[in-house]
Amino acid sequence: MSLAGFEVEVQKSGDTGLETEEMTLNMGPQHPSTHGVLRFVVKADGEVMREAVPDVGYLHRSIEKISEKVGYHGFMPYTDRVDYVAAMFCNQGWGMVCEKLAGIEVPKRGEYCRVIASEFNRISSHLLSVGTMVLDIGATTPFFHAFREREKINDLLEELCGARLTYNYMRIGGVAWDLPPGFVERSLAFLDAFEPLIEEYNDLITYNTIYLGRVADVAAISREDAINYNLVGPNLRASGVKYDVRRDEPYSIYPELEFDVPVGSGEEGTVGDCFDRYIVRIREIQESCKILRQCFKQIPDGPVIAKVPRKFKPPAGDAYIRVESARGDMGWYAVSDGSEFPYRCKVRTGSFAAMAIIDKISRGLMIADLVAVIASLDIVAPEVDR
Amino acid sequence: MQEFLDSLINQGYFAGVPRDVVYAGGMIVFGAIVVLVFVLNVAGVSTWVERRVWARIQSRVGPNRVGPQGILQWLADGIKLIMKEDVVPTAADRPLFLLAPYIVMMGFVGTFVVLPFGSRLVIADMNVGILYVTAVTALVVVGILMAGWASNNKWSLIGGIRSAAQIVSYEIPNGLSIFPIVLLTGTLSMQGIIKAQGWAPWNWFIFANPFTFAAFFIFFTSALAEGNRTPFDLPEAESELVAGFVTEYSGVRYLMFFMAEWGNLYVIGAVVTTLFLGGWQIPHVTDSVVLSAILEFVTFFVKSYFWVLVAMWVRATLPRTRVDQLMAVCWKYLVPIAFVNLLGTAAWMIVWPQGNRPVRFIMLLIALGTVGYFFRRVAYHTRRAGVRAHGELYLSPLS
Amino acid sequence: MKHRGYLGNIVDTAKTVFEGMAVTFSHLIRKPFTIQYPDRTALRVQDTLPFRYRGILEVDLEICTGCLACERACPIDCIVIDVVKDKQTREMLMTRFDIDMAKCMYCGLCSEPCPTGAIHHTPEFEGSDYSLESLIRRFIKEPVVTYKPKKGGEDDPEILPLLDRGMRYVEEFASPEGKKPEAEEEAA
C-alpha cells in the first residue's frame, strides 16, 4: 500500500448517526521506544490498531556500497557498524566470506578467540535486548541492571581489542590480537559472578504477574508464519522451530562445543508469543556462558591469524556464508572480480525480515502492545537499513 | 486553627470585623503559608529523593552535585523550567491549554486545607473532611482531560482519555475502602478519625479487623492509580506516548503538572496515615503544647513520607499495566473485594461492637512476621549476588 | 496467560510483587556501580585503561620510516603524508604528516602495519574542541628526516625508549607465526 495519502474512513454507526474515524498516528522516527530510527504509520480505532505499516530507510548509510571503495581489509571496521550492538558477528561474517573466497584456513586458536569474542558479544547483545524490552514495558530498574553487566563485558572486550562497541577485532584469516595475560581468569571470574545475576533478573521481572500480563499471549507467531516470513534467530526459535546455524550448518569450532538450543514452548501462554521470544534470549545467555567456559578450557596454543597478503586479491567468484548472530542467521555475500576491491557485498540481516511481520501480527493489538512486539522481535535500526 | 483565631478575636485583635471575614482571612493566610513553605518544598524535595532512591535501586548514584548531596537539584530544575520559552502550539485550544495546569494544581493544593498535621495544626477541620479530599482530587481528571484535548496532538489525546478512564474508575475502590473506616468511627472528619485511634500500633485501624487490613491495600493501590503512578502510569507512559498528556507543555506549565504529581503523592501518604495508621497520635510524654505539637507534626510527617518512599520503591520495581488490564484489575478485583470489606466490617461491628483485642494482636504479629520474612528474602538475594561480608554493604545514602 | 483462577491471580501477583520488591531493596543496600568521573576517581581514567585501548592517535616522528603503510591501510584516507627526496643530501624528507581526527574512526588498521610503532593509539579520549579545523593534527612543522633502522640495534639514548615502546605496541598485534607477548609480564 502506498504511504502517501491516507484516506480517513468515516463510518456512520447504526441509528445514532455517530461518526467515527480511524485515527492515523505516526510513531515517528523520533520516539523513545522504537529501537533506533524506525517509523510506523499506525491506523488505530481508539486503542486498538487496525494496521501498522513500517517505514524504513532512516538509517541507511550505503555500507554495502562503501565496501566497493575501501577494499577487503579496509571494510572490516565498517562491518562493525552494520549492527553495532552485536559487532563481533558482523566482523566474523566478513572474515569468513573473504576466507571462503580465497580459500584461507583460520588456525585453531584463532577460531577459539573468534568464538570467545562472539559469545561475549551475544551475551551483551541479549542483555541489551531484554533490558530495553522491559524498559519499554515500563520497568526501569532491570534495564540498568542489564546494562551494568553489559559494562562489565565491555570492560573485558576493551582489554581484548581496545574498543567497547565497534570492536574491529577480527581480520581476514583470524583475529588481530591474542588473548591478553590474565584475560581467562578475569573472564571466568566474571562468569562466576554473572550467572546468579541472571537468576536475580528472573526473580525481579521475568515471572512478574504484571509483566506476564503484558507479554504472554501477545502477538503469537505460528511456526508456519515464522518460516514463511523468513524470521531467524531467537524469533524463529521462540515459535517452536529448532533451527540454529551453529547446530544445523556448523562453522568454526561449534561442532566441538556442547550446548543446548533453547526453543519456545509456550510456558506462560501460546507458543511464539512475546514472552517466548524473551525467555529464549534469557536461556541463550545461559547457554553462551556454558560455551564460554568450554572454550576457555579447550583453547589450544598456536597462532591466531593466518598469513594473508597485504594486497588481498581473491580469485574471481562469489561466496555466501551464514553466521548465527545475536539477532539470528546473518548472511554475508561477496562477489569478487579478481581485484583488490570487492565487486559487490551484500548483508542479509534478521531484523529486516522481522519488520515485515509486524504488520501482520499487530492487527487487533493495542498500541501499548505494538511497543512490546517491536521490542520482543529485537529489531535494531542499523541492521534494518545498513 | 479555629480555636486559635477565636482566642485572637476574644483578645480583641480584630475588633469591628465580622467573624466570618476573620476566619476566611485566616484560612487564606495559613493556606498560603502551608502551600508555599511546606507543600511546594516537599514536592520539590520529593523529586530529588525519588531520583536518589531510584538511582540506588538501579546500582547508580543519583544527582549529587548541585548543593550538598545534590539537594538543590530540584531548585535548579525548577528555575530552568521557569526560564524556558513558553510554547503554546498554534493549533491548540488556547484557553483550555492555558487553564489545564492550574486546575490540576488546584486539585491537589485544595486537599491541604483538611490534612491534620497535629492535634491543633489543621487549617479547617471540616466535618466532611475525607469526602472533601476525595472530591477535590477528582478535579485532576478535568485538568488532565483538558490538557489532553487542548494540545491538539493525538498522542496527548490518547493519554488524556486513558487517564480520565483510569482516575474515574479508581475513585470507586478508593471511596469504598474509606467506608469501613467511616463505619468504625462514625464521622467523616479527619481529626475525628485520628482521635478514634491510639498511638500504639495495635490501636491503629489497619489492625482493627482483617477487613480493614485488606481495605488498606485496596486503598493504597487505588490511590496510586489516582495519582498516575506506576504500575498505573499509562497517561504519561514515557516509552509509548512520548510524554502522554503533557507532551506539548513546556516551562512553567510543565512544572505545574510535575509539582501536582509529586504533591499528590504526599497527599496519598498523608491520607493513608490518617485513615489507617493513627495519624499524629503520640504517647503522652510532655505537657508543653509547643513540644507536643512539634512531636505530632514529626510523627505525621514521618509516617506519611514513609508511604511516599514506598510508592517510589514500587515505581522502580513494577512494569506498567495495559489500559484494559488496568480496568480489569479495578472492576473485577478491587471493587468486589472492597465491597466485601465494607460488608465484613459492618458484620464485625455487629458481632464485636468494641473491637476484638486478640485479633488485633494476631494481625500485628502477622504483619511483623511478613516484614521479617521480607528481610530474610532481601538477605538471600544480597548473598546470592556475591555480597558476602557485612562490610561490603553500602547502607549510607550519602555519596 | 495461564489462568490460575481468581484467587490464584491475586496470590501470584502478591508473591511476585513481594519478590520483586525484595530484589530492589537488596539493591538499595549495595554499593553503586557508578564511577564518578572526572573528579571523584582515584586515578585519572586515562591511566586505568588497558594497554590496547584505541584512543587518539599519536605519531613519534623520530622513529617514523616514511613507508606510507599507515596511509595505505587507512580506509577513510584521513592520514596524509608527503615524502620527498632531498636533492642535496639524498635523504628522504617528510614534509607533511596530517591526521584528520574528525574523520578517524579509531579502527586501529593504521597502527598494525607500522614497522616501528611510530603511529600508535594513546589512552587519551578527551579530544573535543570548538572548531573542526583544530581537529586535524599536523605533526610536522619543519621537514623531518625519515628514520632508518640501524643494523645491530639502536644506540641513540633519545630514540631507544621510543623504539622500545613502539615495538612493544607492535608486538601486541597477532602475527602468523604465533608470537605471543610474554605471559609473565603485566601487559596492562
Image: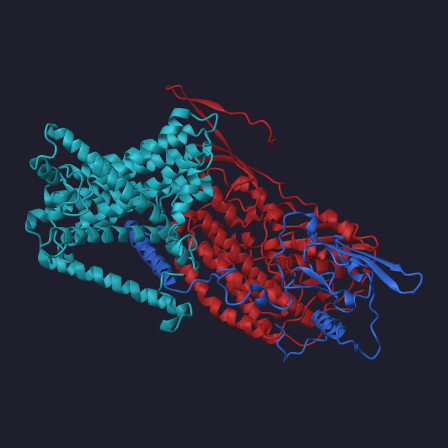
Q: Colour of chain B?
A: cyan
Looking at the picture, does residue C164 appear above or below residue B159? below
Residue at 16%, 54% (x, y): give it: B207
Looking at the picture, does residue B5 appear above or below residue A378? above
Q: Which quarter of the image is occupied by the N terminus of chain A?
A: top right
The image position of residue C7, as x and y in percent, is: 27, 51
Residue at 22%, 45% (x, y): give it: B271
Q: Colour of chain A?
A: red
Residue at 45%, 46% (x, y): give it: A218
Q: Is residue A367 left or right of residue B113?
A: right
The image position of residue C84, as x and y in percent, is: 88, 58
Q: Residue C2: in sight, yes or no? A: no
Q: Is residue B3 left or right of residue B315?
A: left
Q: Colour of chain C?
A: blue
The answer to which of B300 and A265 lies nearer the viewer is: B300
Looking at the picture, does residue B161 appear above or below residue A167? above
The image position of residue B236, as x and y in percent, is: 40, 40
Q: Residue C51: in sight, yes or no? A: yes
The answer to which of B99 and C124 lies nearer the viewer is: C124
The image position of residue C89, as x and y in percent, is: 92, 65
